[in-house]
Image: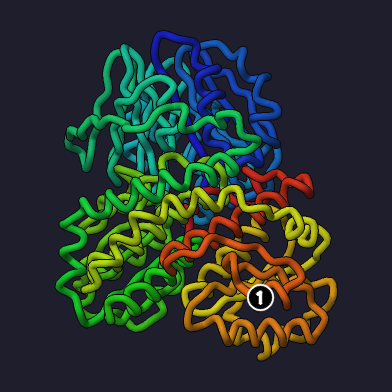
Amino acid sequence: MCGIVGYIGRRKAAGIVIEGLKRLEYRGYDSFGVVTTNDSLHISKKSGRISDGGSGAAGLPGTAGIGHTRWATHGIPNDQNAHPHLDCTGKIAVVHNGIIENYAELRRDLTARGHTFSSDTDTEVIAHLVEEQYAGDLAAAVRAILPLLQGSYALLVIAEGDDRIIAARMASPLVIGVGDREFFCASDVTPLIDHTRRVIYLEDGDCAVLSCSEYTINHDGMAVDRPVEEVDWDIQDARKGGFSHFMQKEIFEQPQVFYNTIHAVRESPDALAHLVGSRMSIMIVACGSSYHAALLCKYLIEVYCGIPVRVEIGSEFKYYTPPLNVPVIGITQSGETADTLAALKMAQAWGCPTIAITNVVGSSVTRIADATIYTRAGPEISVAATKSFIAQLAAALQIAGSLSDDPGLEEELDRVNVMIEDTLTVPIDDAVALCTQAHSIFFIGRGFYYPVALEGALKMKEISYIHAEGYAAGELKHGPFALLSPDTPVVALAMPGKTYPVMISNIKEIKARGAPVIGIGVAGDMELPEIADIFIPLSPSHEVAGIAMVSVILQRLAYHVADALGCDIDKPRNLAKSVTVE
């Protein structure tokens, strides 16, 4: 779960690599490093964030270079464990995203053969393995060692005296950018769009050789062609545009994101066809915020379509009884979530048709799944999911609308983006002030709003570091009531519908135990404002709009609480955007 960037061409490499790494900092930010080459290797690496300390590497000479921003898996974040890693001779340098699962065995064997290691990382074994195979042809040496590596990797390798970059991929994303007599490599397209919109997505098992004038791609010993694709979003989409944080910008982009995604799903007939004929049941696998979107999809399809839906956390999928002859949907924002990819591969091994819901064209999940539904969120830079979650919700709603016999549902979906826009200006200052004083917050809801409560709690804990838990409202009395106190706010989602009366009862039970309540409902409600300490009124709407509106209010609540507490909102501690390890 790191970011890698490479450049080779006619320009000075260091600055291009550094700026590219800054765009990838959401993938990892506990250390960084850059190595460039002309007649020899020039390296700069250290612990900390490249956005704070990367200027020191900008002066490295050479027109070819590779770099890395790290999210630690093996070895603590320090200068020693920062990438790039070198071989014993100091003439071969490697940067790596992924995990080498058999690194301990490889390291023991290499040590026995006389190699000396200078870090605690799994990556360093790659440099030493290449060293053993290197006899003047770096590409041949890299290809020779790839079968020895178990696990996942996106690799960039350079060597002193060799004017090429070698790139290889297995179960970890790697993209080539095609410029004018120059080439780029990166973990995703974000660092590339400053320079080119023409990209090539490498496949698992590909090994590419980049020089100043050309590139070649090899797969299983054979030369292959991969299509050059055009990136369909602009560099401005990956900039703050006057907002204080990327997360704030991305929250405000959600009305357009919802609209774009609804229409994108309607234009995905192949994916919907796998589901239309499946009236018996559907399975969904996902992780994190995508799992909460999956739970919403379950509620929506079961309520509006009468089709049973089973939802599993991607990392737990392998431990459950396999589905039989049912379509399996994998939801993953990045398209690279390792647990979700593994689950879809298992589903295919059991003979199930698979559908991906993802935001990233050309990502790994699009090559695994039988069909793909693209969400149209554009680049999401903040680690905490906001507009990608709303896009997944839009996809779930449109799937339900496509499978439902209710023609009015799709008509309602065309109004949701306007309702989201109204929600962006609803005052929440009193709720923010209450939450900033809390050490723990509960979020509760029923029906559709139970997954929304889970997502609201996740947003709060991710970026404000306040302990927060989401519960089905009826579950509080089965234990969590013991934690209620005047210092424990409860955010209660009490929108109109069949769950409203019992939610009011639950809120009264909470109030009887002294906990302050933030009630989220609709304007004109006569009962909720009387019992809630703070009432946040939303515009009356259809329930499908209500789900989106409440989701956005909870995102805004988390954002403003974190901002008030001075937290690093876009880069919360210990987290990475794309979880590419199991």
Q: Answer with the quarter of the image where residue 413 lies.
A: bottom left
Q: Residues within 10 Å of mark 1 (few under 14, many from 20)?
A: many
Residue located 79% across and 77% down the image: 515
Horizontal arrangement in the rendering, residue 507 relative to residue 336 (left or right) = right
Can residue 188 be seen here? The reply is: yes
SS of the residue at dot 1?
A: helix
Horizontal arrangement in the rendering, residue 392 relative to residue 122 (left or right) = left
357 or 138, nearer to the observer: 357
554 or 380, nearer to the observer: 554
Q: Is residue 390 above or below residue 180?
A: below
Q: Dot 1 corresponds to which residue?
A: 528
Can residue 87 be seen here? The reply is: no
224 or 487, nearer to the observer: 487
Residue located 31% across and 13% down the image: 180
* Residue 474 location (% of width, % of height): 60, 87
* Residue 273 location (% of width, % of height): 16, 64
Q: Is residue 132 above or below residue 472?
A: above
